[in-house]
Structure formats: structure tokens, C-alpha cells
Image (cartoon, helix red, strand yellow):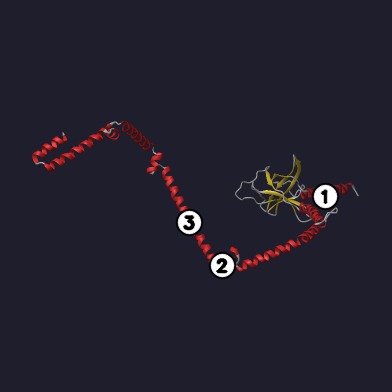
Amino acid sequence: MNNAQQTARVGLFFILGLALTWVTFETLHGGKIFKDNGYTITAGFPDLKELKPGDEVRMAGVKIGYVESTDFTGRRAEAVLRIDKVGPNQKVIEIPDDATASIIMSGLIGTNYLGIDLGSSNRPALKPGAEIRTKVVPDLNSVMNDLGNLGQKLDGALGSISEAMKGKDGQPGLFQRLNTLVGDTGDKFTVTMTNLQELSAKLNRGDGTLGKLINNPKLHDALLVAVDDIKDTANEAKKFMTDAQAVVDQVKSGKGTLGSLIYDDTTGNELKATARDLREISAKLNSGEGTLGKLINDDTLFRDAQSAIKKADRALDGLNDSGPISAVGTVAGSLF
């Protein structure tokens, strides 16, 4: 083998190695090397659940990218998602800002992938480098752990129930307590049942007020009539209260005589003035002022009036006994 052949073989192996390396990187990165790789967004979770770089990112079940890297920042885990151009036209997938990402297990033994819901069509798209909203979806492992914990709690509860039924440390169990209780109260229970049977028989015969009410239809009808009367009385009382409330409202608003007396200052002042005048008149009457006061307090006018009446009587008697001329003189003499 000459040097030219050796050189050709070395060059061929070198080219094949480069091609194999390129194919390997293309496969690991989804065939996006030396191409426009779309854009990246960030998703934060309390636990990535074995999500690793290279796992798929799906939207509505369609692969739209992959997990580019994972990291732990602060008190949470973050995954950087590479969103590719998809479809024959290499269209950039726009993710609404209200879309939600979650880690989903594909099958019982399948790998995890990151699923994104569609969000709202009228929302603006996430910008490159933005953080998408996330939610934790229970996976099979967490469900199995919860079932295991529930089984342990159920086993403990069943054990406690079994101990309560059978008894523990020499203490009687629930069944033994029930047997003792039934044995101790058997006679009392029999007496109680007998009393109930007698009471039922009395009710069926119509004995007592309750028995009559159950068996006598007339009493039942009378009771219904009484109930109707009570309802009518209640309605009338309600109407009366409504009317009374209306009157109270009118009085409060100052309407009517009573309302004016209570709430109208002018009427109140006039009433006070009238009362004051009455007090003054009463005082004057008591002190004998004026004609009416003298009539009430001074008996001289009364005696003068009695004297005038007596004179008038004598004058009238003289008229009966005298002529016209004499009568005039008689009257004048009697009066003066």
C-alpha cells in the first residue's frame, strides 16, 4: 500500500467521523444545528420530576420544541424551553401569555415531556426570554404514594376498630358492652314496648285528646276552622299595624292636625300663646278684673240685680191695679 492510498483512507475516515459527529449532534438537538432555532422561554417548577434536556415540548399534543437546559435557582427548579419553527412553512409558534405549562408522564414507563395548553386566542404572545405560567399535575408516582399513605392510614383505622370491637388489655370490647347493655336493660325495654302498644291501642280507639284528634273528623274540621280564624285575625292585625304605621308616618311628616301640633313650630307657638292668654284671662277673672270678673267675684252686682227684679215685680203688680196714667207713675216710683 503506497502513501497515496493511506492518505486517502485517513481522509475518508476523518470525513466519516465528522459526518457521524454531525449526525449525532443533529439527533440530540432535534436537527436544529446551523438553523434558526426559534426562541426560548422559561418554566419554573417546585420539582422537575426527572425532566431533562432533550425532552419534548408539546402543545395540544404536537411537538413544538424541546427542553434546552435545566437548572436550580433559589428554591425552585427551572427549565429553559426551546420553541422551534414547525410545519412545512417553518412557522414560529406563538404561545399566548395566559397559556400554562405542566410536566406530563407519557405512559407507565415512558419519559416525561412538557405540555403547554392552547391558552386564549385573543391574548398577546409570550416574548422571547419570558416566563410561562406553570401548574403541577399529579403523576403516577405521586398518586401511588398517596394511595400508599391512604392504605397505611386505613390499616391503622381498621386496627383501631378491631381493638374497639374485641377489647384490649382486659377491657371489654364493643360487642361485650352491647351484650351487657342489652342484658341489663332487657326488662325495661320490654316494659317500654308494652307501654307503647297500650298507647297505640288508645290512640286507635280515640281515647284522649290526641286520639280524638286523630279519629274524629269533626274535631279536625273544627281545628281547621279555628286555624283559619286565627289567620284572619292575624291578617286584620297586620292591616291595623299597617294603617297605624301610615298614621305615624303622616304625624312624623307633620301632616294633619296632630302632626302640625307636634312638628310645626308655628302651630306650637300659637298654641303656647293661646295657653298664655288663657292663663292671663283666668288670672284677671280670679282677681275680679273686668265685667266678667266682677260678675264672678263681686256679689254686689248680684244683689243689685235681685233688687231690680223685685222692683220690676212690684211695678207689674201695680199695673194690674191702676189705670194707665196711674200705672206710669206707679212704675216710675217702683223703679226709682
Label 3 and label 1: CA atoms lie apart by 109 Å
Residue highlighted by disc 2: 216
Residue 222 place in picture, x, y as percent: 52, 64
Identity, as a three-letter code, of the amino acid under mark 3: Thr
The quarter of the picture where residue 279 lies is: top left
Identity, as a three-letter code, of the amino acid under mark 2: Asn
Q: Earlier in the sequence, mark 3 or mark 1?
A: 1
- 68 or 220: nearer the eye? 220
Residue 81 place in picture, x, y as percent: 72, 46
- 104 or 265: nearer the eye? 265
| Left or right, residue 210 beside residue 167 | left
Q: Which of marks 2 and 1 is nearer the N terminus?
A: 1
Label 3 and label 2: CA atoms lie apart by 26 Å
Residue highlighted by disc 1: 16
* Residue at image coords 81%, 49%: 20
Q: In this view, does 198 lie above or below 166?
A: below
Q: SS for tag 1?
A: helix
- Asked if marks 3 and 2 touch (Cβ < 8 Å), the reply is no
Q: How many labels does the image show?
A: 3
Residue highlighted by disc 3: 233
> Mark 1 packing: few (<14 Cα in 10 Å), some, or many (20+)?
few
Image quadrant where one finds the C terminus: top left
Closer mark to the observer between disc 3 and disc 2: 2
* Residue sitting at the far front: 321
The quarter of the picture where residue 127 lies is: top right
> Mark 3 packing: few (<14 Cα in 10 Å), some, or many (20+)?
few
Residue 308 place in picture, x, y as percent: 20, 36
Identity, as a three-letter code, of the amino acid under mark 1: Leu
Q: SS for tag 3?
A: helix
